[in-house]
Amino acid sequence: MEQTTKKIVIAIDGFSSCGKSTFAKAIAARLGYIFIDTGAMYRAVTLYALEHGAIVDGKVAEDRVVALLPDVNISFRFNAERGASDAYVNGERVEDKIRSIEVSNMVSHVSSIAQVREKLVAMQQQMGRARGVVMDGRDIGTVVFPDAELKIFMTADAQVRAERRYAELKAKGDNVTMEEILENVISRDKADMTREISPLRQAEDAVVLDNSHMSVEEQMAWFMERYEGIVNA
Ligand code: DC
């Protein structure tokens, strides 16, 4: 008789530009799990705030962001062409807009607002209630799913991450210097780790994956070993 493998929650947290989303997407495809990019949700709220006058001249009116929250309806729809889910706000596809520099510059501030986190954490818990999800973010193993069966904390040398990001931006035609990228990586690490609510930290029961010198295949092999150990236990 065929045996059904038990479905688990896989929480992936870690520093920015570590390749968390790429890794999480590959795992979800391999296991037939749902992939949830929680950073996209914080970006979606930020975009909505920018488009509805709650952020003006780089200043966030926190009370206005909070007042807008009930109107922001975030969803994901699978895009077969991309092989991944696109983010939607109130029915509009926002996948490209949420990656813009305007959103990237303001998302740290918006994601530090308590009511924003409260709403998005509740949504994330709802999305993962049936298990069978890979969720990537900063607080998944610590706050959203403290009971996740597998928690991975991803990290890589700041220099290596800056080099990857530099290559990515150069390929897109952006005019950036290695120095400014490295500075940005270091300052975002600091902002993520020192914010008051849900700062980035490793859950006690998380396993660390330092992928500074690992290929995607090596990371997948590393993952499968741990995954098999859990579902076959
Ligand atoms: O992973 P990303 O760069 O797309 O995340 C965008 C921002 O959202 C980043 O500033 C960190 C924040 N974030 C968060 O506070 N909690 C999460 N679970 C995911 C992202």
Image: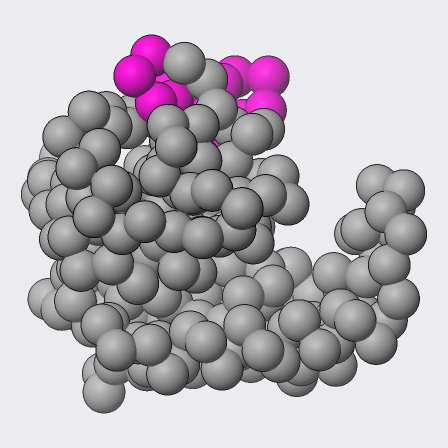
Identity of the residue drawn at 81% across and 61% down: 166
Q: Position of residue 54 (x, y in %)?
A: 35, 39
Q: Is residue 219 magenta?
A: no
Q: Is residue 101 left or right of residue 90?
A: right
- Residue 117 can be seen in this image: yes
Q: Is residue 8 left or right of residue 58?
A: left
Magenta residue span: 76-91
Q: How many numbered badges does the structure rendering display?
A: 0
Identity of the residue drawn at 42% across and 43% down: 55
Q: Position of residue 7 (x, y in %)?
A: 18, 47
Image quadrant occupied by the N terminus: top left
- Residue 44 can be seen in this image: no
Identity of the residue drawn at 79% across and 71% down: 180
Q: Toward the viewer: 11 or 115?
A: 115
Q: Position of residue 228 (x, y in %)?
A: 32, 63
Instruction: Using the image, determine if residue 213 lies above or below residue 135.
Output: below
Identity of the residue drawn at 47% across and 42% down: 56
Instruction: Using the image, determine if residue 96 lies above or below residue 176.
Output: above
- Dominant secondary structure of the magenta stretch? strand
Residue, far top = 91
